Image: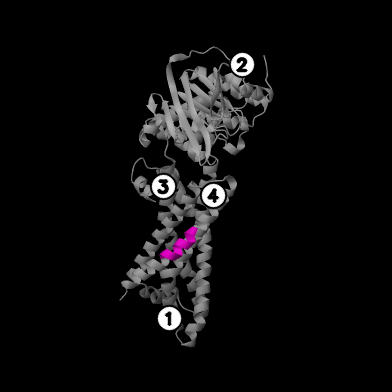
């Protein structure tokens, strides 16, 4: 991790590779994030309605859903998806390059494989994860709206007028911080496991697997820590 | 096939190794090895599997660090160099891996472009393309420029691997088992290519192999490794007609194409 921070600001920069990785991390995850976000919005709304209906408080649904999605569901679910899809991919790709001596070959040809392979991927996951989180929050709220509209006949405008005031600046800021931290975690864990893979094909499988497991574990730990810190600032 | 005569400058050692020791955990791999590689010379290092041949060239390239002893490459002691100095020195070294180690997510063009872009940033795209085409033409690979490594045969992969190192015009070539896994005809082509590289690009080379045909065809000098050091050194004939037990064993288990 220390090496990442010393290399990331030092030229030459691998812009082309970073953009390629941003495309792979961001664009290639859109379909999965869209589907998961949309379903999450619908399911969460459906599950919350009976409890609120008991108290005659279904009008709180938009606010409750907006808070849940923005504060927790979007950053957490998106990052877990990215960990599963991108983290495993990075672990396997770099692991395979390591055991077939491709990383060593880059080093011998007087180039810096760390900058090309690790820095570009970690920057890409760190930049793309917040965008995916924003996108998932939007799609999740859209799914929630369709469900609310179907049951309560609420207009699009009314849904968002009830939902958005519940979200504070602190919620948005905390979500942004979370998504950056989780994106970085996925990238650095995948790269670390892949870059240090050993023992042939077995090692590649292990790198991919451990990258996902460790990323997810770290994301939950970070979630707990960030929530505890952010709650200190809530009025 | 005998190789053509080459000019070897015996006053000028491009690699000088003295008292080299390397062990992994409790396994002593190299135990006091000495070697000189002279300018323009191809030295073949022969030895059984697991005798430390590949370890030797990885030490020369600075990928591994020796436990003790010195390795001088082009007058610079590898162990004393900073990472930046080592990177600069590596521009003078070309390394062909046993498995070719081509970047499998890149085309042949991109494989060659990769070191060129990063080490010769002043070249224009046209100059880069010309350099890539020239070296591929020399390797008889110009039709493979847009192919992925997975689409190439074993022999073609080795050729691309050699092309990728030659694009930076190294002074020293390190070949790790260049004919391993290849059929005899393709092996012969690779041996011929190694000699052509020596002639055309004026390189000196350390060739690691256990293929005696490769040793005989490409080596100006042969060094036989046993028990972590060289037990015999000289021309191919000197090594294998000397009656040395290790050399005899090695010779008896190999088929030699004599011509």
Q: Are marks 1 and 3 in contact (CB under 8 Å)?
A: no
Q: Are marks 4 and 2 in contact (CB under 8 Å)?
A: no
- What's the CA distance linking mark 1 and mark 2? 95 Å
Q: Are marks 3 and 2 on the same chain?
A: no
Q: Residues within 10 Å of mark 3 (few under 14, many from 20)?
A: many
**What chain does badge 2 belong to?**
B
- What's the CA distance linking mark 1 and mark 3? 44 Å
- What's the CA distance linking mark 3 and mark 2? 55 Å
- The part of the chain drawn in magenta is A214-222
Coordinates of residue B211 in the picture (x, y in percent): 63, 25
Q: Residues within 10 Å of mark 2 (few under 14, many from 20)?
A: few
Query: What is the chief secondary structure element of the magenta stretch?
Result: helix
Residue drawn at the location 43% of the way across and 65% of the way down = A221
Label 2, on which residue? B242
Q: Residues within 10 Å of mark 4 (few under 14, many from 20)?
A: many
Q: Which mark is residue A119?
A: 3
Coordinates of residue B255 in the picture (x, y in percent): 69, 23
| In the depicted structure, whether residue B54 falls above or below residue A164 | above
**What chain does badge 3 belong to?**
A
Residue drawn at the location 49% of the way across and 83% of the way down = A51
- What's the CA distance linking mark 4 and mark 2? 50 Å
């Amino acid at each position: 991790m220390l090496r990442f921070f010393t290399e990331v600001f030092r030229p030459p920069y691998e812009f082309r590779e970073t953009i390629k990785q941003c495309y792979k991390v961001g664009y290639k995850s859109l379909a999965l994030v869209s589907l998961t976000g949309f379903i999450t919005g619908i399911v969460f709304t459906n599950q919350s309605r009976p409890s609120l209906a008991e108290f005659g408080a279904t009008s709180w649904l938009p606010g409750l859903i907006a808070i849940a999605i923005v504060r927790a569901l979007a950053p957490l679910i998106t990052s877990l998806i990215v960990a599963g899809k991108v983290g495993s991919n990075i672990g396997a790709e770099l692991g395979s390059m390591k055991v077939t001596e491709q990383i060593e070959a880059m080093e011998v040809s007087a180039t810096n494989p760390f900058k090309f392979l690790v820095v570009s991927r970690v920057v890409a996951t760190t930049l793309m994860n917040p965008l995916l989180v924003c996108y998932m929050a939007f799609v999740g709220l859209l799914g929630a709206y369709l469900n609310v509209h179907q049951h309560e006949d609420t207009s699009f405008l009314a849904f968002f007028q009830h939902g958005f005031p519940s979200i504070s600046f602190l919620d948005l800021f905390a979500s942004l911080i979370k998504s950056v931290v989780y994106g970085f975690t996925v990238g650095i864990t995948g790269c670390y496991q892949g870059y240090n893979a050993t023992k042939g094909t077995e090692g590649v499988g292990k790198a991919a697997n451990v990258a996902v497991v460790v990323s997810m574990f770290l994301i939950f730990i970070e979630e707990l820590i960030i929530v505890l810190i952010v709650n200190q600032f809530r009025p | 096939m005998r190789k053509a005569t080459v000019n070897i400058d015996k006053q000028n050692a491009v690699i000088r190794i003295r008292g080299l020791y390397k062990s992994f955990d409790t396994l002593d791999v190299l135990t006091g090895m000495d070697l000189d590689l002279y300018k323009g010379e191809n030295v073949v290092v022969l030895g059984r599997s697991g005798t430390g041949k590949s370890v030797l060239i990885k030490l020369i390239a600075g990928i591994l660090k020796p436990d003790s002893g010195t390795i001088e490459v082009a007058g610079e002691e590898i162990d004393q160099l900073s990472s930046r100095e080592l990177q600069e020195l590596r521009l003078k070294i070309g390394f062909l891996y046993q498995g070719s180690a081509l970047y499998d997510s890149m085309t042949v063009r991109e494989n060659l472009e990769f070191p060129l872009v990063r080490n010769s940033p002043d070249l224009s795209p046209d100059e880069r393309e010309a350099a890539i085409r020239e070296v591929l033409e020399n390797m008889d690979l110009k039709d493979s420029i847009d192919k992925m490594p997975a689409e190439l045969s074993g022999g073609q992969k080795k050729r691309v691997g050699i092309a990728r190192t030659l694009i930076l015009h190294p002074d020293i070539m390190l070949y790790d088992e260049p004919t391993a896994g290849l059929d005899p005809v393709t092996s012969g082509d690779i041996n011929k290519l190694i000699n052509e590289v020596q002639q055309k690009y004026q390189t000196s080379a350390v060739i690691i192999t256990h293929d005696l045909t490769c040793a005989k065809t490409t080596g100006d000098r042969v060094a036989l490794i046993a028990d972590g050091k060289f037990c015999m050194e000289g021309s191919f004939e000197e090594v294998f007609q000397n009656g040395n037990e290790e050399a005899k064993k090695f010779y008896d288990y190999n088929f030699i194409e004599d011509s």
